[in-house]
Image: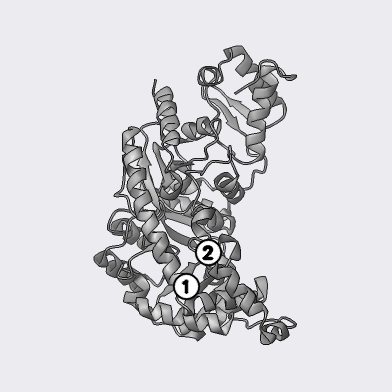
Amino acid sequence: MLMRAASQSLTEQLAERFAQRIRDRLLAPGARLPSVRQCAQQHEVSPSTVVAAYDQLQAQGLVEARRNRGFFVRDRMPGPVPAAEERGREAEARLAGEAERLRTPLNAATLIRGMFHPSGPRPQPGLGIFPPDWLVSNFMHAAVRKVTGSQSLQDNSLRYGEPLGDGDLRRVLSARLRALGVPAGPGQIMTTVGATHALDIVSRTLLKPGDCVMVEEPGWAVEFARLDALGMRILPVPRGPAGPDLEVMARYCEVHAPRLFVSVSVFHNPTGYCLAPGSAHRVLQLAQAHGFHVVEDDTYSHIAPEHATRMTVLDGLQRTIYVSGFAKILAPNWRVGFLAAPPDLVERLLDTKLLATLTTPSLLEKALALCIEQGQLRRHAERIRSRLDAARSRSVKLALQAGCRFAAEPAGLFGWVDTGVDTDQLAQRMLDQGYLLAPGALFHAARAPSTLMRINFATTQDAAFWQVLAREVEALAR
């Protein structure tokens, strides 16, 4: 709340609050500030105080007024429209509503800072990882101590490691993938600095600026931003309960000749959907007919049923590339990820990795291999799954009591919740209460108002959060 007895005036306090959020990228370029009336009601000040605060923000060059529309955060680093985008617009027009969504780029820094900037000491409903106390274990530290005491590791630390990654880890990953049905030998597996690094290696190897990439929508906001930053043309494919919209994919193939399709088949982020076998077969048929590759991001494999449909299993790593990591289930800061690729792509992908990072550190890779071999990671994942099931049941009950509904059947780590109000505006109000939300607009290739938001079932166990949310939703709905 604003302090009436503070040394700063109410106008200065309000202006500084918005300025700090803009600097922290919690208010993205192009985001609309609350209307003068809404802001005055929310902060219990007069409309003239709000107008004066917005004037200060304008004077600082942080916001701009748009006639009859309100105040918007300025884009302080505008960039030119890529020539490839101009050339492609005529063809995109044939896709009617889909084409319009292709024209608004996302800013990677905005999304990353907005999703991970700490908003307070409470568990944050918008975060994409398990709470730290869920991941606490003794076996990781024991594994690190064991490998650091190894004379061979001490000797190997004085030279670069294996280019593809630690051989022990690649062998145990190969065995794990084969148990899932993915036919990847150790020579087809490459370790990376997290799954995002794996996705980046694939993009930089197989694509060039201006190439078209199909992505699921809603989908992972950071992936949209990363591809946009590389100069790729993003083709959003609506994702439903069974999988991507196959008709939209077919039209994209005919008009744009995409080079890549990025998919989260199992426990899709943010909906929790799992791919149906029929949809998977049809996607692979399109890939074969039109010559594009499919990247399957299996980040949530450790909390998913092993029998879940995976395109890399059906395809046998021919036109597919498998990506996963351990940030979600083990330790986000270890940054151990990997990819498995067709044999004919491995050397090209390795060249890209070498240009970016040379090799990846062996220490944590060897420790992780030990955790997997001894079954500790498997038992840890089973405990997490059991705890998540209980948390999901409680979170769903609390959400429904708060007047929300689920736009997708609750499953996995995330829930796709309809609040009935603009969640961009709701997110700003909830920041004042110490909660960071993940509004639905973040999960679309072009940011547009949405009543949906993604929640983390593991961090939405507090009834107090849902009570605050219900109160703010009611205030916005008036």
At label 1, counting other C-alpha atoms closer than 10 Å, the crowd grade (few under 14, some 14-19, many 20 or more) is some
- Residue 154, compared with residue 121, is above or below; it is below
Q: CA distance from mark 2 to mark 1?
A: 10 Å
Q: Is residue 297 visible?
A: no
Q: For the point 30% across and 71% down, which residue is it?
A: 285
In the image, 173 versus 95, the foreground residue is 173
In this rendering, does residue 450 appear at all? yes
Disc nearer the start of the sequence (2/1): 2
Q: For this view, does 191 lie left or right of residue 451?
A: right
Could you tell me residue 62's position as x and y percent?
67, 32
Which structural element holds mark 1?
helix
Determine whether the residue tagged by mark 2 lies in a helix, strand or loop.
loop
Vertical position of residue 24 compared to residue 237: above or below? above
The residue pinned by badge 1 equals 376
The disc labelled 1 sits on which kind of residue? Gln
- Which quadrant holds the C terminus? top left
Q: Position of residue 294 (x, y in %)?
A: 41, 69
Q: Residue at x 32, y 48 (%)?
A: 393
Other residues around mark 2 within 10 Å, as few (<14) / some (14–19) / many (≥20): some
Asked whether 194 or 254 is in front, the reply is 194
Tell me where residue 166 sits by quadrant: bottom right
Identify the image quadrant of the N terminus. top right
Which amino acid, mark 2? Ser
Left or right relative to 35: residue 241: left
The answer to whether residue 327 is above or below residue 464 is: below
Percent coordinates x, y for residue 348 in the rendering: 56, 79
**Marks 2,1: beta carbons within 8 A:** yes
Left or right of 285? Residue 320 is: right
**Residue of label 2:** 137
